[in-house]
Amino acid sequence: MKYLIIKDTNIVSSERSKGINRELYKISRPSPDVNDVTLYQYEEIKHPITDERAIVFNDNDEIQVGQNPNVTKLKELVSANATPIEQDQLEQYIISQQGNRIVFKNIIPSSVTIKTFEEMELDGWFVINEEI
């Protein structure tokens, strides 16, 4: 497992994380079915003290790109971590892959922090409740 850290910007971490996660789901489902029971692509975890969020993923995770995906909102949400060139490349890449699968880690901006389980554990993301 890897953890994509979502930092506060002009939008708090919890809202950015939900927004990014929702927009990633919409890439695969540009026209969601009314019977869909989920709105998000990935699991999200919350830091117990700082309230920061992280999106949980695996290195080999793929996202099916649906027809006519709209990445405008995703570009806005990642703008704090991506240069305008990276944002344009993200949009062009996703649109060029309609009907195909993309590897999630390949669309993560270079300035985003990704941590391993061990790093997350050291940073206090996981609380262990021990009974005596």
Image (cartoon, rainbow, N blue to C red):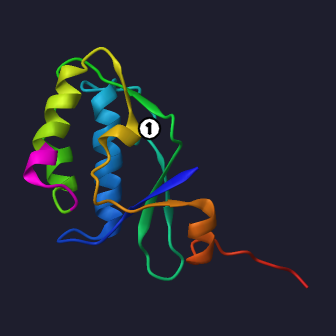
Q: Verify whether residue 82 appears in magenta.
A: yes
Secondary structure beneath label 1:
loop
Image-based side of 16 in relation to 119, left or right: left
Q: At 57% from the left edge and 72% from the top edge, which residue is drawn? A: 125
Q: How many marks?
A: 1
**Disc 1: CA contacts within 10 A as few (<14), some (14-19) or many (>=20):** few
Locate the C terminus by quadrant.
bottom right
Q: Is residue 86 above or below residue 66?
A: below
Image quadrant assignment for residue 62: top left
Identify the residue position indicated by label 1 in the image.
38
107 lies above or below 28? below
Which of the two residues, 124 or 40, is positioned nearer the viewer here? 124
Which stretch appears magenta? 81-87
Q: Position of residue 51 (x, y in %)?
A: 43, 76
Observer-nearest of 8 and 113: 113
Residue drawn at point x = 34 percent, y = 54 percent: 18
Q: Indicate the position of residue 94 as horizontal and vertical percent values.
A: 22, 29
Q: Is residue 85 above or below residue 44?
A: above
* Residue sitting at x 19%, y 55%: 82
Question: Residue 130 location, x and y as percent?
Answer: 82, 79
Amino acid bearing label 1: Thr
Can residue 56 be seen in this snapshot?
yes
Residue most extreme to the right: 132
Residue 71 visible in image: no
